Amino acid sequence: MQNKSQSSTALRRLMTEYRQLTSSGAPEGLFTAGPVKESNFFEWEALIHGPEDTPFEGGIFVARLSFPSDYPLNPFKMKFDPPILHPNVYASGDVCISILHAPGDDPNQYETSSERWSPVQSVEKVLLSVISMLAEPNVESGANIDCCKLYRENLPEYERRVRQAVMDQLGV
């Protein structure tokens, strides 16, 4: 029975967040997000615009957001589809960012509990954090080790590859 009440709490929260995103709107031109199907509020799609003055500028990146039945007690999963080249994105497309790590203390003692997920976070706050992450990767805590190495050792080549991927996406 608890799982059903958790699920209904999660659904109410997701509906509220969606309503807020659609009525007041997401920050102008940064992203859009909402359920893939209105029959399933636990699977969302986000379209994230590449931040200005970064190699991602001009691109629109699709991400899937998968919410657990106990949301907002636990964070959702976020995956770029198709995957993007970024130090904090696994080759699978899964996003690695502190704000989406399980609440509480970090077993590796790398992050403070205040950097990790808490129920006061929201889809909007996470997407804004991911946009910041695109502009300023955390190469000290990378998900894609080869990309971290490229970023640290040959930034111009990293930026060229990202720009090329954006151009390929645009069909240019």
Image (tube, rainbow, N blue to C red):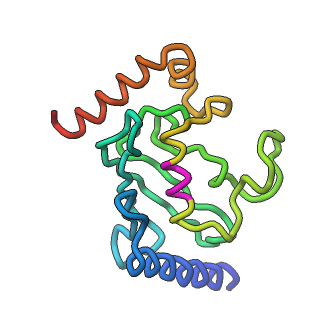
Tell me what residue is drawn at x 33 percent, y 72 percent: 37
Tell me what residue is drawn at x 56 percent, y 80 percent: 13
On screen, residue 46 above or below 160:
below
In the rendered view of the protein, which quadrant contains the N terminus? bottom right
The front one of 11 and 126 is 126
Magenta stretch contains residue 103: no
The answer to which quarter of the image holds residue 107 is: top right
Please, which residue is most extreme toward the left here?
172
Q: Is residue 86 left or right of residue 9?
A: left
- Residue 25 placed where, x, y %? 40, 73
Q: Main secondary structure of the magenta part?
A: helix
Tell me what residue is drawn at x 34 percent, y 41 percent: 57
The answer to which quarter of the image holds residue 169 is: top left
Tell me what residue is drawn at x 37 percent, y 63 percent: 28
- Where does the magenta region start and end? 126-131
The answer to which quarter of the image holds residue 111 is: top right
Q: Is residue 152 left or right of residue 168?
A: right
Magenta stretch contains residue 129: yes
On screen, residue 59 above or below 1:
above
The front one of 50 and 116 is 50
- Residue 89 placed where, x, y %? 51, 38
- Residue 138 placed where, x, y %? 61, 35
In the rendered view of the protein, which quadrant contains the C terminus? top left
